[in-house]
Amino acid sequence: MKTLQKLRENSQQWEKYWRREEVIETIRRFFKDNGFHEVEVPLLLPTVSTEPFLEVFRTELTNDQGKKWPAFLPSSPEFALKKLLSAGSGSIFTITKSFRNGEGRSSRHNPEFTILEWYTTPGDYWTVAGQFEQLMLQINRGKDKLRYQGKEYSLKTPWQRLSVAEAFTKYAGVEVESMLDEAKLKEIGKQKGYLVTAKTTWEEIWNQIFANEIEPKLGQTGPTILYDYPTAQAALAKKAKDPRFAERWELYLAGMELGNCFSELTDYREQETRCKADLAERKKLGKTEYPMDREFIEALKLGMPPTGGIAVGVDRLVALFTDVLAVSETLFFPVEELFDKRNTI
């Protein structure tokens, strides 16, 4: 039975969808009350951000003369927002749609999803952490206890902060020097029973250990901020005091990754180098190819101020505060209903 039928037959089903509306309105009010400007971003672009492991939706723009241009749906609004920051916008936020292809269907992902991004300036990733703590309490109607799927979680601040290096040592028994060394980490992976071949990369074995031994341990009693990722995994973040790491954190709660935060990289030269490396990696991986967004680099040349920024999955956030397992349970038109067997190519 499709969502529209369920709503028609059981009026009580509407409650969780109106809770979604309440969550989004609370987010908007929080940032307005804290002096942020809300901005709109384009959803049809000539090129998109350079994340090497995300696949994009490609389309085509055609004018009335038959001229055609390649076009893409954004995987995030990040580049557009940073252009505005570089132009002098001050602290800004957007609640918009983004698109990621090729990831399949799961309880935590819809290919078309709602994303919240905000950038606070002057600020860094710890500035954003404090804002997120207050935002979550406000969404929870001021309560510091949250019940989700029969379990109680504490939203009391400050939230747990755990570095990536500490997490690998604590949960996987891998010391920092071994974690950062490809040969050593691959050998550890073999000893742990992971599939490791001559073609296995450092990032692949890192991800296997992280997904199986570390991620399930995070956010089990309250939010966990996992911070300072290896620099290779934070192409848009500035380096930490230890240059092997970057000022990036992710938030975990109740088995969900909710947000990805950076102290934003403002050096246009380094950013251009990293973007080129990401595009080369995309080509190597067989992902859709497209040119680098030169306008983004030119905007950074204007001088982007010290900024902390974060992307938050609104659909996951709503699922958490509505106490449902799947994000589709609060979407009027989830992808599995739009592209059912009758519409499959």
Image (cartoon, rainbow, N blue to C red):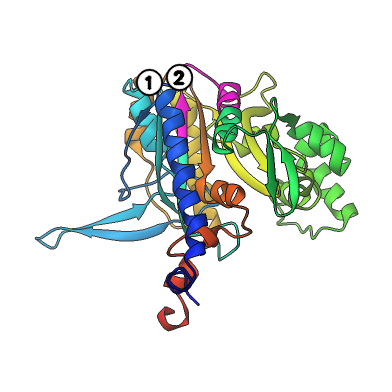
Relative image position of residue 177 (x, y in whole percent): 82, 32
Relative image position of residue 130 (x, y in whole percent): 60, 24
Disc 1 marks which amino acid?
Gly
Relative image position of residue 287 (x, y in whole percent): 49, 57
Front-most of residues 189 and 316: 316
- Residue range in magenta is 117-131
118 inside magenta stretch: yes
Residue at 50 percent of width and 56 percent of height: 15
Relative image position of residue 269 (x, y in whole percent): 45, 26
Helix, strand or loop for disc 1: loop
Query: Vertically, is 303 above or below 52?
Result: above
Calculate the distance from the C-alpha at mark 2 to the C-alpha at mark 1. 6 Å
Query: Vertically, is 260 above or below 61?
Result: above
Residue at 55 percent of width and 65 percent of height: 104
Disc 2: which residue: 121
Front-most of residues 127 and 87: 127
Q: Is residue 129 visible?
A: yes
Which quarter of the picture shows residue 78? Answer: top left
Disc 1: which residue: 90
Disc 2 marks which amino acid?
Thr
Residue at 55 percent of width and 35 percent of height: 235
